Image: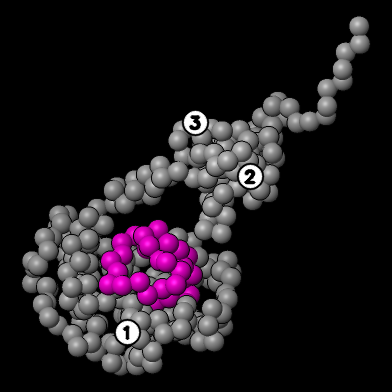
Amino acid sequence: MVTKAKKPGRSKAKDRREDSEEDSARGKHFVNGLAKGLSMIQAFSAETPALTLTEAADATGLTRASARRILMTLEDLGFVAREGVRHFILTPKVLTLGYSYLASTPLWSFASPILQDLVEEVRETCAIAVQDDTDLVYVLRIPVHRILSQGVIVGSRLPLYCHSAGRVLLADLSPAQLDAYFMRARFKAFTPRTVVDPARLRKLLKDVTRQQYAWVSSEIEENITGLSVPIRQVDGRVIAALNVSVNQPMVKEEAMVKRLLPSLQAAADRIHASLSVGQPMRRGTGPQHLKGRGG
């Protein structure tokens, strides 16, 4: 009896051995399978909303066998679904991962009604952003109307260096943290006005520290101007940035600061006060709430 030779391929034992070796290299605590699953979720984007098995493997640097097991596991858990015969897509269940972060951080429940008050007062789009490595991430955002062509929503990521909220967050870093940021960040000009020179950016960050606000005009998109202030924890460290965006050509810094900065600072103070006492403030309450100010 002649037996057919098995086609060469990767065995599960070999995959497990490589996983074990990678775990050992990173530390005994490291769960390689979890890291691969998270990298698979992050492989999907606006540019690649649907991936084939081969595309998923290429995007994550995994073998086809590993990519297939991870995708099937995510499918079993409800985070991934099939589209047609060959493609995989994310499902809305992935949103629960981000919601867990928002729900577990008291600041966002404290800040939401205050942000709504601010939007009604200044009649401009307002948001709160936090730092995630070299990007900022919107954790709260209330638009007056759609002003950014990127379709910015909660969870959207933008570079720190060319956004007013990003510069507020960078300005609070220690010298060592800031040096590490400049080593990791990749600077790209989105418009002719985007500042990409590290030396000039460092100088601008010193100005932010001195002024306690950041103003950026037409660096991410033409005619989009942003003004941001820090939101501080009880210990004084910056936990987030409060931002207002204006879609208007040729906005002068002096005029924007005069019209919007007092309201921004008052809202940031209210959020800080809420964190200090550990309970949310209702809309329209508190000594820092200013109605009709601006303009």
Give, as a three-letter code, the residue at label 3: Asp
Mark 2–mark 1 distance (CA, rounded to whole Å): 50 Å
Give the mark toward the camera: 3 or 1. 3
Give the image location of residue 93, x and y in percent. Answer: 40, 42
Is any part of residue 236 visible from this angle? no
Which residue has dot 2 on it?
52
User: Circle 2 — which element?
Assistant: strand
Q: In front: 100, or 295?
A: 295
Give, as a three-letter code, the residue at label 2: Thr
User: Circle 1 — which element?
Assistant: helix
Mark 3–mark 2 distance (CA, rounded to whole Å): 17 Å
What residue is at 51 percent from the left and 39 percent from the top? 81
Give the image location of residue 112, x and y in percent. Answer: 22, 61
Which residue has dot 3 on it?
76
State which quarter of the image contains the C terminus. bottom left
Answer whether residue 143 is magenta in the image. yes
Is any part of residue 42 visible from this angle? yes
Is label 2 in contact with label 1 (beta carbons under 8 Å)? no
Q: Of label 3 and label 2, which has the lower sequence position?
A: 2
What residue is at 12 percent from the left and 64 percent from the top? 283
Q: Of label 3 and label 1, which has the lower sequence position?
A: 3
The label number, if any, that marks residue 211 in the structure image = 1
